[in-house]
Amino acid sequence: MNPLHKLHQAGQSLWLDNITRALLDNGGLQRYIDEFAITGLTSNPSIFHGAITGSDAYRAAIAASRAGNAEALFFELALDDLQRAADLFAPVHRSTRGVDGWVSLEVSPLLADDAQATVAAALELHRRAARDNLFIKIPGNAAGCKAIEEATFAGVPINVTLLFSGRHLVAAAEAWIRGIERRLTAGREPRIPSVLSLFVSRWDVAVAKQVPPELHNKLGIAVAQQAYQDYLALCATPRFRRLAEIGVPVQRLLWASTGTKDPKAPDTLYAEALYAPDTIDTLPEKTIHAFADHGRVGAPMARDGAAAAAMLERYRQAGVDIEALAERLQQEGKLAFDKAWRDLLAVIDDERHRGGAPAAGVLS
């Protein structure tokens, strides 16, 4: 039994932070399920950009498509990949009664500040996917929270992305709760699953040049620990408990951006630190293999936030404005996904031209 199986048996779900057509075609994803206890996966514009530019696996589908523009063609490709992945995870989804076995597809990042357009896109992608175990990803910014409430009310399972703090997490969770409560009032089925994706490693990248060496690669973990306390407090509130008591699945906490960015740091740094029962850790392929080889399953994350609070205070004394940085990271994350999205559409358009498909403009 490798350490990933031990981590899974200790109560944490492990999801792959990647998808490529090659993984589907060559049986790689099935091997992750069988050999590494992987029970779900996530995707984002950067991941699909890497998948499409990193191989020829999509070339024939791009050339053959009659989609009207690059964005429409992208969603054809992404939905095909994610439907296949969802089918591979369907046995896990059934055996865990919907707790695990999920895949995720993001709406266009260009819609992040338009709640109405985000909801419309979420509804359409959810309809087209036609899979019970596919989340639609919506960012947890101000407009996104409005969209999360409306999409939840409409019955769309949501993976809330681009969360960087406990405050972000609570705001997104409350939006989901409002959507569920509105469904209850309207007499609709209230069991609409959701997860909250908190980004971790980007904190350490952001402050690496600002803080002394003894504080390198510790901020993301401290923020995650504090957010975990906020999450536990949220789960204990009467509103949250009421939903659980009537059978609404708990909105789970998901750790995102967990690959080690600093080559001087351990390659299993975040995966080891973020172990907490009933949470999800999304792992890049490199981290999966590293943890399977030499990862350690230690004590679970503390339910007492004293150590995290003390560490965050050290960063404040070093001049880091934690709250302001959370807002900056969310905005920078949105801009990074915007760029990856535009680059992705440009690549698809270029492939269409080279493959002889009808020309199409890149969305702006």
Image: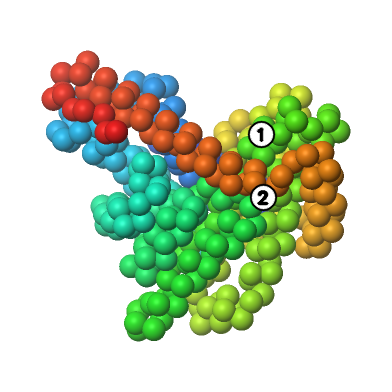
Q: State how the image is colored.
A: rainbow
Please identify the quarter of the rendering in which residue 302 is found: bottom right
Q: Is residue 24 left or right of residue 349?
A: right
Percent position of residue 246, x then y: 51, 82
Question: Is 83 in front, or is 262?
Answer: 262
Residue at 68% of width from left, 66% of height from top? 232
- The quadrant the C terminus occupies is top left
Identity of the amino acid at label 2?
A: Glu
Q: Which mark is residue 323?
A: 2
- The quadrant the N terminus occupies is top right
Residue at 67% of width from left, 39% of height from top? 203
Tag in front: 1 or 2: 2
Percent position of residue 245, x then y: 56, 82
Per the model, the C-alpha gap separating discs 1 and 2 is 13 Å
Please identify the quarter of the rendering in which residue 351 is found: top left
Identity of the amino acid at label 1?
A: Ala
Which tag, 1 or 2, sits closer to the chain's start? Answer: 1
Give the SS element for disc 1: helix
Residue at 55% of width from left, 56% of height from top? 196
User: Mark 1 sits on what residue?
Assistant: 206
